[in-house]
Amino acid sequence: MFDTQGNTIKSNTTVTVTAAATPPGTITLTKAALKGKNPSLGKDVLTLGGSIALPTTVTSLSGPLTISIGSVSKTFALNAKGSGTAVPSSFKFGKRTSVAPFTAKISANLSSVLTAAGVPAGGSGKATIPVTITFGGADYAGILNLNVTTTGANVVGK
């Protein structure tokens, strides 16, 4: 390059390339049921069933696992059979094939999760809630769609 008077212009450009983060694996949710009270007494129960495709490098179903339902998280220490409890919540992997089926029972105050998903306390409606599982050094993500109905003091969702 030259300037307007014919002088050579030198320029150095540095380009930094950053690898994109590895996208999370996918959680396939096949069952969901919510039972709670209005107002929540901290004993709402969300039962989930589904599966995740674990990489072949994961050879054991034991170890720490964290499941997050919206802003509520529970961490479990899974035993050699892939099950664990954080009383009164529980998580269990089923027999692994190409995917790892699981069931989870989450007991907590879920009113803030429902409110964040657009269902106000005492209200009814459709809730779309992010679900993440961290296990074996990887993250898995899915979406929980619940139709929430509040009748008097009872809250249910499917």
Image (cartoon, rainbow, N blue to C red):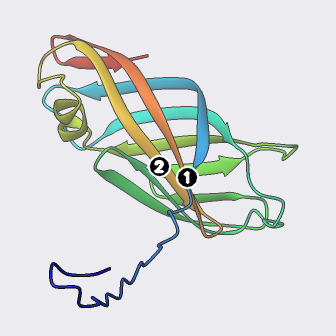
The residue depicted at 32 percent of the width and 44 percent of the height is 70
Residue holding disc 1: 24
Q: Which quarter shows the C terminus?
A: top left
Label 1 vs label 2, nearer the camera: 1
Q: Is residue 30 left or right of residue 8?
A: right
Of residues 154 and 66, the one nearer the viewer is 66
Tell me if label 1 and label 2 are in contact, CB under 8 Å: yes
Kindly indicate the quadrant of the structure image that contains residue 79: bottom right
Q: Which mark is residue 132?
A: 2
Find numbered disc 2 in the image and state the secondary structure of the residue it sits on: strand
The amino acid at mark 2 is: Thr
The residue depicted at 88 percent of the width and 43 percent of the height is 97
Residue 30 placement (x, y as % from top left) = 61, 24
The amino acid at mark 1 is: Pro
Q: Residues within 10 Å of mark 1 (few under 14, many from 20)?
A: some
Residue 149 placement (x, y as % from top left) = 27, 11
The residue depicted at 23 percent of the width and 30 percent of the height is 117
Find numbered disc 1 in the image and state the secondary structure of the residue it sits on: loop
Q: Is residue 130 left or right of residue 95?
A: left
Is 46 situated above or below 70?
Answer: above
Which badge, 1 or 2, comes first in the chain's sequence? Answer: 1
Of residues 15 and 30, the one nearer the viewer is 15
Q: Which quarter shows the N terminus?
A: bottom left
